[in-house]
Amino acid sequence: MALISIFGKEDISYIEELKQCYHTLEKGYNSLAINIPGTLFYTAMKARRKLGQIVARILSSRRQRKAEASDLLGSFMQADNLTNDQITDNIIGVLFAARDTTASVLTWIIKFLGENPAILEAVTVKYHSYLLSSSQAILDNSSIEVYVRFCIYRKNIRKSSRTERCAIRGGP
């Protein structure tokens, strides 16, 4: 999802290659910085260079087409003071932030809601009132699906924090 937000749907042909390079880079990101062939760090640095080459190809292609894009890469390209290397660095930073930050925030939210049943209940009430405030939301199948998922997530949060009754044991 982050890749489409950054590069848009025009450059979708590069998505798989970008994903592969990013995952390789991520694996070696926190490894011991020994730049010898065969190490995670060495492989990550090769992936980083390849990522830079892919972004450079996309930039070149867009500049040749004089394409106006409303995605993040297009915004970086409109900035007069950014070089291709700076744009690439920014793109990689956003990729790391999109993946790590989102996962961390969701983990902390679930933990927080599990430890604070009163707040979980307030969120549930707010969500119920949101659904009931719009008759269209109730009739819309996707909203009903979202509501059902929310109920399942709520139950899982309670189970993970040991506040939901377990069907097998019958206790908290």
Image: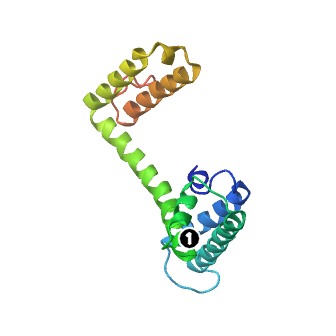
Quarter of the image where one finds residue 132: top left
- Residue plotted at (45% across, 50% down): 102
145 on left or right of 125: right
Q: Is residue 76 above or below residue 36?
A: above
Total numbered labels: 1
Task: Return the residue nearer the eye: 31 or 145.
Answer: 145
- Residue plotted at (67% across, 69% down): 54
Q: Is residue 58 above or below residue 170?
A: below
User: Which residue is situated farthest in the bottom direction here?
Assistant: 36
Task: Return the residue nearer the eye: 35 or 18.
Answer: 18
Q: Is residue 14 above or below residue 161?
A: below
Q: Is residue 6 above or below residue 139?
A: below
Dot 1, crowdedness within 10 Å: few (<14), some or many (≥20)?
A: many
Quickly name the residue at label 1: 88
| Residue 150, horizontal then vertical, whole percent | 46, 28
Q: Quadrant of the C terminus?
A: top left
| Residue 83, horizontal then vertical, whole percent | 54, 76
- Residue plotted at (35% across, 36% down): 161
| Residue 21, horizontal then vertical, whole percent | 64, 67
User: Which residue is situated farthest in the right direction here?
Assistant: 13
- Residue plotted at (50% across, 67% down): 79
Q: Secondary structure at mark 1?
A: helix
| Residue 7, horizontal then vertical, whole percent | 61, 57
Q: How is the image coloured?
A: rainbow
- Residue type pointed to by label 1: Thr
